[in-house]
Amino acid sequence: MIFLKYCLILLFNCITFNEAYKILGVFASSSTSHTMLGKELLKTLAEHGHEVTMISTSPLTTPMKNYRDIVVKADLKKEYLSRTGNENYFKLSQSFGLNSVFNLFKSGIEISEIIVKDENVQKLLNSNEHFDAVIVVTFVYDALYAIANHFNAPLIVYAQAGPTAFVNDMVGNPNNYAYVPEWFLGFTDRMTFKQRAINTISSLFFEVIKHLYYYPQQNELTKKLFPNAPDLYTIRTNVSLVLSNSHVSIRYPRPLVPNIIEIGGHHVKDPKPLPADLQKFMDSAPNGVIYFSLGSNLRSKDLSPVLRDTILKVFSKLPQKILWKWEDANLPGKPHNVFTQKWFPQSDILAHPNLRLFITHGGWGSTVESITRGVPVVGIPAIADQHANMRQCQQMGLGVLLDLKNITEVSFAWAINEVLNNPQYKKEMQKRAQLFLDREISPAKRAVYWTEYVIRNKGAYHLQSAATHLNLIQIILLDVVGFCVIIVVTIILILFFVSRYILRKLCKSNSKTIDQKKKQS
């Protein structure tokens, strides 16, 4: 009887701790990297027994258990570029300015509508399915947060590059302009007075645009697409959790509210064996291998012919072998030591012992992978947070930063040889990798735990900061400062008028006394 009792308890515990949840991920985006990161997160959740559904523009190449794709048919990257008037992201980087910010916001509103109105997405929304949590990537598609409300599920936000201004707004995260730079400026946390002034003015201006233009537009779209949902402002302040693809060891230290959970590096898995041709190429490189990739949004084939030929000249003179992510079938003038392919298993290549250097655009995913694998970098950023990522790497001594607009044969060759021949870069990168990997739990397991935590507790609203219910004026205490100024000014005015009144009385009294003395004399 006792044995049977213990068997039942064991069975109950197994059922309790292995409960499968239904989780919806919304990672449809104009940025391929967002989808890639979302896939890795949902694959991890599926591996832990949960049933996951993924809304994105690209399904898994190899189907897996517990994982279902809902494919958005539109080419969102093409939609975004067409709305900004650019053929590719290099063209976009050359014309970035205030107009680009408005184009970004406008495209976000239009693409949000494309996603929700997609035939496959509509089938899901009109189904009777139930989800225990909805995870939405944060970008400029705020209306998509209403999908969580539609399914009456807790909302988890995935911050692909750490806490941005949009994330800070949602959860009331402190955003001190003295040491928290705006992502598009390319500053680090160690800013000069001039940079702090620019950062403050730019950040405040960005806040004004968001609150007077972007949020009202997204709110109107939310009402249109989800008539029964609360307004967007309510939805945004009811975020249960932010899964932030960041970590203090590779980002600058800053305060985070309790419902921002750092899972930076969750997508980096143990290295897998390389395809036979790549393995042979890298194994037979006595002087090592250099890997060159501009990521998933920028394409090497869109480089200007002049810059392409400059790069090839430098590569042809190097003793190392080169792996270059080149999107066309042929690379004109390709030297014998260069191997090209449309796509490489980047994380696995970076883990190969012969890999000496990573020439990168500086996207956050690539930056995290290079640090995890301990590979120094030469950064040639073009857009978004790439400048800030590479400037931070340079500040930490992890590599060298080049200006894409001013690359010459001399500067490119110098940067490569500087990082290859100066062992300090490799040493600093390995130190940083140790800091990044030394955690109490792996980032993938942390992501799973906190997702399950939100579901178990029907949300994590007890972690929310009261700052989510305050506006900018209240958060920076302008109302209190204004009240204090009014009080001080009022006291000064009272003292002034009282003093003037007393002085007038005294003057009149003295005048009467003098007149009386004159009469008596």
Image (tube, helix red, strand yellow):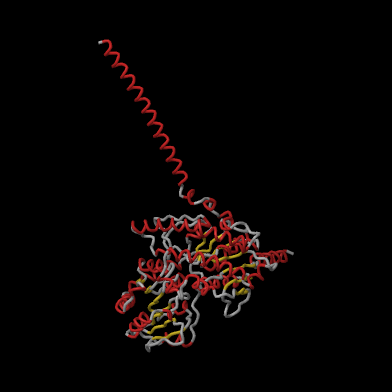
Q: Residue at x 36, y 85 (%)?
A: 286
Residue 135 in percent (x, y) is at 58, 65
Residue sitting at the far front: 519
**Image mark count:** 0
Of the pair 7 and 472, the residue shown nearer to us: 472
- Using the image, determine if residue 164 lies above or below residue 291: above
Q: Quadrant of the C terminus?
A: top left
Q: Quadrant of the N terminus?
A: bottom right
Residue sitting at the far right: 1
Of the pair 195 and 270, the residue shown nearer to us: 195
Which corner quadrant of the image does residue 410 belong to?
A: bottom left
Residue sitting at the far top: 520
Whether residue 275 is visible here, answered yes or no, is yes
Q: Residue at x 58, y 70 (%)?
A: 114
Whether residue 371 is visible here, answered yes or no, is no
Q: Relative to residue 57, is residue 297 drawn left or right?
A: left
- Using the image, determine if residue 471 lies above or below residue 517: below
- Using the image, determine if residue 470 lies above or below residue 293: above
Residue sitting at the far bottom: 336
Which corner quadrant of the image does residue 421 belong to?
A: bottom left
Q: Residue at x 58, y 77 (%)?
A: 59
Q: Relative to residue 18, is residue 107 drawn left or right?
A: left
Residue 425 in percent (x, y) is at 35, 72
Residue 431 in percent (x, y) is at 39, 69
Residue 25 in percent (x, y) is at 59, 68
